[in-house]
């Protein structure tokens, strides 16, 4: 068992935290955009100021790519799901011919966005076979409008969705360039899925959850994978579930590492979201993530 580690040296200069919390609430609920903008106008003082602040809150996918064509081999694929084929981005080191550990990348609650496709390539660049799954495949795939994607996430059948991710892990274990060892890494909605997959798949070797919802304490005994849990210190909504989850992990002698990055927000890893992204926390969390995968999937 690993003792939780608290990183107190990481800080972030942000706009009014109430505005960030409002945006977080909006992106994780079903309130309308009209209602969100009304509340944002109240916090900023006017509709004009709200429209000025908005671009700093929303993702700018023009800045999504950090891994460029030629650095990894990546292709859009389909694989068998619970009901029909699932879409995804499969990536691996350039011209790779040897067997590698494999990682399923689980997106946020807006689908397989350009940012998460880039994260999938980052995993590949680090030396793994990576599969970014499009959970919205049953609806035809991730739409360009991220707000539409957020609406569709709420319409997924939870049991079938979990099954589709288990199918993705099966696909990777059987993939010719996979060594059979598998991990998952998920962000926000995907962080919650990473925790669920750790419960559901006894063959999973490693699971990394970035600011993801925790599973119920009674489900923890089923976890076999090594866990790594990343949280933003300002993320009160998600962090409320930490104590019970950690207590259950300790009580069941599970192999885990838990990091709280003080002074940073939910979604601190998303470099297309300028207000919430924190470079220092993101780089440290990513290095820890890749180190875990190298240890457990090599």
Image (cartoon, grey):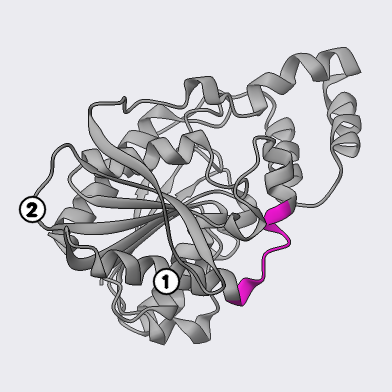
- Image quarter (top left, top right, bottom left or bottom right) of the C terminus: bottom left
Q: Is residue 202 above or below residue 15?
A: below
Classify mark 2: residues with Cα within 10 Å, few (<14), some (14-19) or many (20+): few
Classify mark 1: residues with Cα within 10 Å, few (<14), some (14-19) or many (20+): some
Q: Is residue 113 magenta?
A: no
Residue at image coords 72%, 37%:
23
User: Which is more N-terminal, label 2 or label 1?
Assistant: 2
State left or right for residue 284 relative to residue 244. Answer: left
Tag 1 and tag 2, C-beta contact below 8 Å: no
From the image, tell me which residue sits under label 1.
Answer: 167
Instruction: Point out residue 61 in the picture as x, y percentages from the top left corner.
Output: 54, 26
Q: Nearer the viewer, residue 239 or 77?
A: 77
- Image quarter (top left, top right, bottom left or bottom right) of the N terminus: bottom left
Disc number placed over residue 98 in the picture, else none: 2
Q: Is residue 154 magenta?
A: yes
Q: Give me the C-alpha separation between circle 1 and circle 2.
A: 23 Å
State left or right for residue 10 relative to residue 243. Answer: left
Residue at image coords 27%, 72%:
255
Residue interval drawn in magenta? 152-159
């Amino acid at each position: 068992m690993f003792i939780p580690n608290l990183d107190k040296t990481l800080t972030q200069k942000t706009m009014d935290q109430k505005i960030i919390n409002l945006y977080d609430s909006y992106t994780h609920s079903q309130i309308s955009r009209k209602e969100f903008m009304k509340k944002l106008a109240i916090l900023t003082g006017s509709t004009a100021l709200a429209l000025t602040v908005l671009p700093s809150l929303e993702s700018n996918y023009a800045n999504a790519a950090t891994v460029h064509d030629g650095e990894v081999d990546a292709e859009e694929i389909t694989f068998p799901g619970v009901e029909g084929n699932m879409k995804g981005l499969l990536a691996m080191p350039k011209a790779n011919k040897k067997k590698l550990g494999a990682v399923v990348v689980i997106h946020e609650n807006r689908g397989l966005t350009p940012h998460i496709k880039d994260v999938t390539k980052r995993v590949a660049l680090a030396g793994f076979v990576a599969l970014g799954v499009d959970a919205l495949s049953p609806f035809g795939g991730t739409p360009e409008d991220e707000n539409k994607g957020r609406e569709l996430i709420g319409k997924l059948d939870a049991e079938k969705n979990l099954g589709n991710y288990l199918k993705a892990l099966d696909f990777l274990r059987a993939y010719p360039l996979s060594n059979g060892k598998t991990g998952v890494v998920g962000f926000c909605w995907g962080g919650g899925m990473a925790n669920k997959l750790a419960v559901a798949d006894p063959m999973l070797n490693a699971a990394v959850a970035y600011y993801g919802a925790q599973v119920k304490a009674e489900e923890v005994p089923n976890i076999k994978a090594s866990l790594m849990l990343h949280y933003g210190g300002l993320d009160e909504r998600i962090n409320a579930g930490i104590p019970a989850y950690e207590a259950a992990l300790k009580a069941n002698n599970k192999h885990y590492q838990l990091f709280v990055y003080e002074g940073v927000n939910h979604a601190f890893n998303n470099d297309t979201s300028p207000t919430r992204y924190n470079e220092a926390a993101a780089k440290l969390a990513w290095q820890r993530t890749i180190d875990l995968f190298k240890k457990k999937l090599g």
